[in-house]
Image: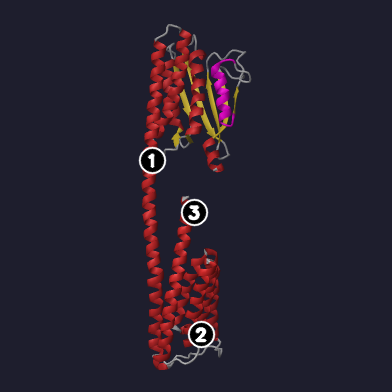
Amino acid sequence: MKKPNRIKERINDKTNLLVKFNYISSAISFLFGLASVFVLKIEHVIPHVFFIYPIVNLFNVFCFKKHRSLTTMAIVTSILSLVSTLLITVFSGGIESPFIFVFALIVLAGYISTSMFGKIYIKVVLAFIISIYLLGVFDFSIITNVVPIESKKLFSLFSILFSVYLLGDVFGKNLLKTHHKLYKSKTEIEQRIKEKEILLREVHHRVKNNLQTVSSLLNMQSRNTDDDIIKAIMRGSQNRVIVMAMVHEMLYMHKNLSKIEFKPYVEELSNYLLKSLNSEKCDISLNIDIPPEIELGIDTAIPLGLLINETVTNSLKYGFIGKHKGKIDIRMEKRDSENSYVLHISDDGTGFLEDDNLEKPKSLGLRLIKSLAKQLKGHVVKDLTKTGTKYTLSFEDIDRQYKRVA
């Protein structure tokens, strides 16, 4: 509802400005006509134009009350102003006439209708001004100054007053009013954005706290059982919850509330898993090669973090049994496409069982990896030619896809 209201408000502002311009210019034109007859003693053309202009212009406003077409009224006003200004300029000295500056004002009136009409209108006005100049240069008889010599200075004064009053009282006040409205709207929008950012940070903070509470509950539940299988399941679920909590924590701490820097997130996640799952106390080195400029949205970061959690967890739990030293590599690169990436996760451990198949996964971890890859609009493969375990995930930043669709 807000957008149509703003459009309606803009149309009302344009309408009020154009109607005000018509009323004031008509009144001043009529007074200028009286001054031309009784003060300046001008007998030909100019007084007639000054008297005809307000009659036609007010009739134009009256017709607008019936048809309600702002464009029609603006076009009629623009043509009438152009013809009137042209005639007065031609018969008051041509290019040397002080009234020629009124052309600048009527160009502003042309832009009231639409920017397209204003662009066309300014070209027409420029063409007329150049034509007036050429008529004077080639001494065409059409250029006739009907203003008496003794009234030229006074005519110049009236012309300047006419221009300045229209510029200041009509356009100047309106531009100032529009500026104040824009500044007020800008301030209100900035305030709302700030309030929403604070609210969003609070949401991320609360979600993170809630997830940590869930993690603590899972930890407490695991302590109430002596079954190692149940404890392992609880521990796996707890780690998955922590993966999601870390994303919300980073969004809460980061300036950008919609994206997180992915490299620090992976470093924090990997170090946490290494500390919590390296029960064999194996000397495992982490090599994380992710460009620092890569930032991902929450809809991409969470499933990707869960996938990294599953692969690194598998490596730590099963990849280094009986070994005293090992290495885990996590490497990510951006493809040429705007939102396409490739993630490589590998270790130099003992590898995986031959019956572990990503096409028909048996374990929960492999099923999650396959499902998360699908969620990221990508696919994951295992490299059977390398020592240890290596996953290659091709995926897309689904947050950017949603923005393009929107």
Magenta region, residue range: 362-378
- Residue 360, given in percent of the width and then of the height, sits at 63, 18
Residue 393 visible here: no
Label 1 Cα neighbours within 10 Å, binned few <14 / some 14-19 / many ≥20: some
Q: Is residue 53 left or right of residue 207?
A: right
- State the scheme by which the image is colored: secondary structure
**Element at label 3:** helix
**Element at label 2:** helix
In magenta stretch: residue 364: yes
**Element at label 1:** helix
Tell me, for residue 4, which label it has, or none.
Answer: 3
Q: CA distance from mark 3 to mark 2?
A: 45 Å
Residue found at x 37% / y 38%? 199
Q: Which residue is disc 2 drawn over?
A: 90
Three-letter amino acid code at the position of disc 1: Glu
Residue found at x 40% / y 37%? 200
Which residue is nearer to you in this view: 255 or 203? 203
Three-letter amino acid code at the position of disc 2: Val
- N-terminal of the pair, mark 3 or mark 1, is 3
